[in-house]
Amino acid sequence: MFNWICALELDQDRQIIAGSEKALSDAVRRGADLRVGTTFRHNEHIDTDSTNTELVREVMDFRIVYLLKDYWVAGVQNLRMPVSLRKGFGPRESMSFFLYNQDGHQAIARPYLDGRVPTGEIGPSPTDDHWDMPKYYELDRWDVETNAPSSNFIYAFDVYRFFVCDQWEEVYAHDADGNPQYGSIENLADASMEGCEIKVAISGLCCRLNTGDDTMEHQVFVHGVPVIITLKKNISLLLLIHWSVLDPIFPCVMPAGHGVSVGLTPVVMVTSTVGCVIPTHSNSVVNKDIMLCAGSLVNRDDFLTQ
């Protein structure tokens, strides 16, 4: 069993009560996995018409993690769909891309997948007061009645626990042109063929998506699906295919001007050991009780294994 530890814990007012922000960012920088645990009352968050006051405990897995300015952590859930208890999935086919910052600021982007013709316009939208959820504070809202609405908000959970599993090892790194900088392709390919998970760490990934001058130094850590292709003797190519969520908004409107906000763009990303298909740089990690790290998207790719 992997060793998960609580690196940071916040109370309902989002004040630190255990751990530290530094412990969280240090672990993420080394490629650690991230999960966030929260608690809330059923009739305050799940079904506000219910009289059920039972405590609900939830732990969420964040397969996409941002490290901003080398100290600020935010995670995105990229495999979640809306579910109504006892009713099944939501009324429309969609994804629930929840985003959590290390200070408890949250966001949601909901791309609909049913192809319905949108009736709204892209841009700022009026906020909802969420009168039936007194612990829900919506900060802003975007693109309502389109096929990809989003909003930034705070839901005052009873507690926020940021868990990390710090067991990754960097096995290979290369620059944007595919020039090796650390490790070897063979080690990466061997680890993958032994069943290791793959994680890729990309620096500056969202800079090309921001047309302004306010881009922020950042790294994005993403789990990937390994595919090994042998081109010829002693030469192997590793492809990592990600269903990723990217955020072009840096910095976001957060306290002290840092953090990640919504404006999420779902993409399919492919990167390889001979260069990144996206015109930036990526780092790759493999998961097998070894540890992986990250490099710079614009300058190099790092491959990690666990």
Image: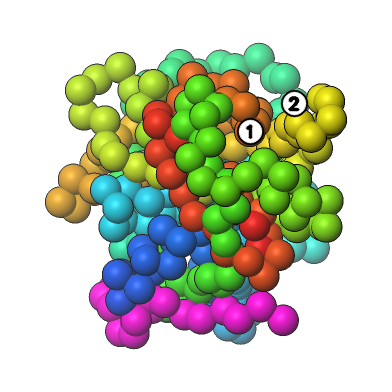
Residue that appears at 29% across and 57% down: 71
Q: In this rendering, would 29 be left or right of 227? A: left
**Boundaries of the magenta span:** 1-19
Q: Earlier in the sequence, mark 1 or mark 2?
A: 2
Whether tag 1 and tag 2 are in contact, CB under 8 A, the answer is no
The image shows residue 4, relative to residue 153, as above or below, that is below
Q: Which residue is mark 2?
A: 114
Extreme residue in the front direction? 233
Q: How many marks?
A: 2
Observer-nearest of 66 and 88: 66
Q: Nearer the viewer, residue 85 or 68?
A: 68
Compared with 71, 227 (above or below) is above
Name the spot of residue 138 as percent of width and height, x first.
36, 49
Going by the numbered disc 2, the residue's amino acid type is Asp
Helix, strand or loop at label 2? It is: loop
Is the residue 97 above or below the residue 241 in the image?
A: below
Question: Is 10 placed left or right of 82 in the picture?
Answer: left
Q: Please, what secondary structure does the residue beneath circle 1 have?
A: loop
The circle drawn on residue 273 is 1
Looking at the picture, which amino acid does disc 1 mark? Thr
Q: Which quadrant is the N terminus positioned in?
A: bottom right
Give how far across and how far down residue 263 sits, in percent.
Answer: 42, 32
Q: Is residue 109 visible?
A: no
- Give how far apart the Cα atoms at labels 1 and 2 are: 35 Å
Tell me if residue 4 is in the magenta stretch. yes
Residue 177, compared with residue 219, is above or below; it is: above
Q: Residues within 10 Å of mark 1 (few under 14, many from 20)?
A: many
